[in-house]
Amino acid sequence: MQPNQEKFISLVKEKNKGKNLKYSILTMGCQLNENDSEKIAGMLDEMGYIEIDNYKEADLVIFNTCCVRENAEERLFGKIGEIKKIKESKNVILAIGGCMMQEKNMVNKIKKSYPFVNLIFGTHTMQNLPENIYKAIIKQEKVRDILDIDGEIFEGLPIKRNNEYKASVTIMYGCNNFCTYCIVPYVRGRERSREPEKILEEIKGLAKEGYKEITLLGQNVNSYKGNEKIKNFADLLNEVCKIDGIERVNFISPHPKDFTDDVIEAIANNEKISRIIHLPLQSGNTKVLKEMNRKYTKEQYLSLVDKMKERIPNLVLSTDIIVGFPGETEEEFEDTLDVVKKVNFEQVFMFIYSIREGTVAAEREDQIPEEIKHKRFDKLKELYESRVDENNEKYLNTVQKLLIEGKSKNNENMLEGRTTTNKVVIFNSNEKNKIGDIVSVKITEAHRWYLKGEIV
Ligand code: SAH
Ligand code: SF4
Ligand code: F3S
């Protein structure tokens, strides 16, 4: 925390004393966005605000926005409208931050059409929140705090985590890849890696507090750059796995082009690392991949998968796929289906291509009609879902190590945990088992969205 921000924290705290003011954060984006919300919550707690879930009842509402796809905008405007109504009868402070606020046209639109928004902040100025809230509530100013250039990395922001045994740790900010469909590099700036020692210190602290599972976050985690001692992502993974108390390590997202052998070795050698790896494919066609600027071919992707599966037994993969990229022909789309069949992904996150102003692909004139995009989406979904049961049945009669997450949502008497491949398993609890423990469970039933098992 910056010393000058500490001052504003105390000033706001003093001003709010005895008022029992409540805040609510609506997180609209990815895990990095969620991690930012945890930091925002950490600062607001220090300022004396109390967190509540229902943003309609809060005195301070924060929208943490995302702009990776178009529908996010409509959703945000709808929410702003809801707060406008509440503002008519009650003094509510509305602050909007996150990736969408790094887009100039969006900020202009809010200034023009929604002038009652009290505070707008970008992703590079989040750490100034105490000062900005001070200005908004005490000086009643309209605050617009956005930086175009890449922000520095601010260490030591207070953080309020939304889970007691699983934690996310951002290891790098920004993205240098400029995939031609993607807005992220424009709103998050260039890649900046945190110092490895700071990351390890944070994770050691989490282990002491009882956290068992860590997810390392970044837009392209395997291009992480460390220092002389901990040079790259593979080194970092090895160091994180040495930390006592941490039982599981995930990371999201790696880029296939940077999936070097040392990272594969690090995974193979460390059982703590999850056996589900997210490996974004985007398209299975080499020409489309080239136009997306992904820097790998269909064949290179498939041979990387083969190499990983050979070296890491029991590995399963998840992926992101975009259908309907400009110019994509039916034949090219078939290549995507072909890769999905060959790799047999255990989870597929499917997206319909969405035009993002300012990106290279948005300029293309050969945009695919909505109807075709939707047809392709449905076809991909059908293929993926047709494999789900088969993939689940593979688990029958195997013994899986589960990290217990809590009571089953559908059955009070059962506990729920996840395998190292992120499958939900429910099982009969026994007095001794607690949240955060690792237990061995034999899988007895496979259902579509969960497995059932017995402790062994
Ligand atoms: N850096 C990560 C995640 C980026 S955003 C990665 O490269 O994997 C998450 C996903 O959103 C992407 O993987 C991509 O599949 C999807 N996405 C990004 N831009 C998109 C767009 N314009 N239209 C549709 N989907 C998009
Ligand atoms: Fe976007 Fe590509 Fe960067 Fe991922 S790697 S954030 S898809 S530009
Ligand atoms: Fe994440 Fe959306 Fe920003 S996906 S990085 S919150 S644009």
Image: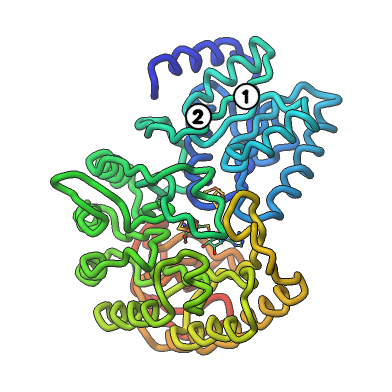
- Would residue 352 appear left or right of 44 to someone viewing this image? right
Could you say which is closer to the camera, residue 259 or residue 8?
A: 259
- Would residue 348 appear left or right of 217 to someone viewing this image? right
Image vertical order of residue 39 relative to residue 239, above or below: above
Residue indicated by mark 2 = 125
- Closer to the chain start, of discs 2 and 1, is 2
Q: Residue 128 carries which label?
A: none
Q: Which quarter of the figure is the N terminus placed in?
A: top left
Residue 63, position in %: x, y?
Answer: 64, 38
Amino acid of disc 1: Arg
Q: Which quarter of the figure is the C terminus placed in?
A: bottom left
Q: Residue at x 85, y 25 (%)?
A: 89
Amino acid of disc 2: Thr
Image vertical order of residue 261 relative to residue 171, above or below: below
Q: What element carries label 1?
A: strand
Residue 389, position in %: x, y?
Answer: 55, 86
Are circles 2 and 1 on residues that touch, CB within 8 Å?
no
Determine the CA span between mark 2 and mark 1: 10 Å
Residue 25, position in %: x, y?
Answer: 62, 38
- Would residue 92 appear left or right of 303 to someone viewing this image? right
Farthest residue, direction left = 229
Could you say which is closer to the camera, residue 364 or residue 251?
A: 364
Q: Which residue is drawn at 74% across and 35% down?
A: 109
Q: Residue at x 81, y 27 (%)?
A: 87
Residue 417, position in %: x, y?
Answer: 45, 66
Quadrant of res 388: bottom right
Q: Which mark is residue 144?
A: 1
Q: Is mark 2 on a helix, strand or loop?
A: loop
User: What colouring method underlies this structural image?
Assistant: rainbow
Is residue 141 in view? yes
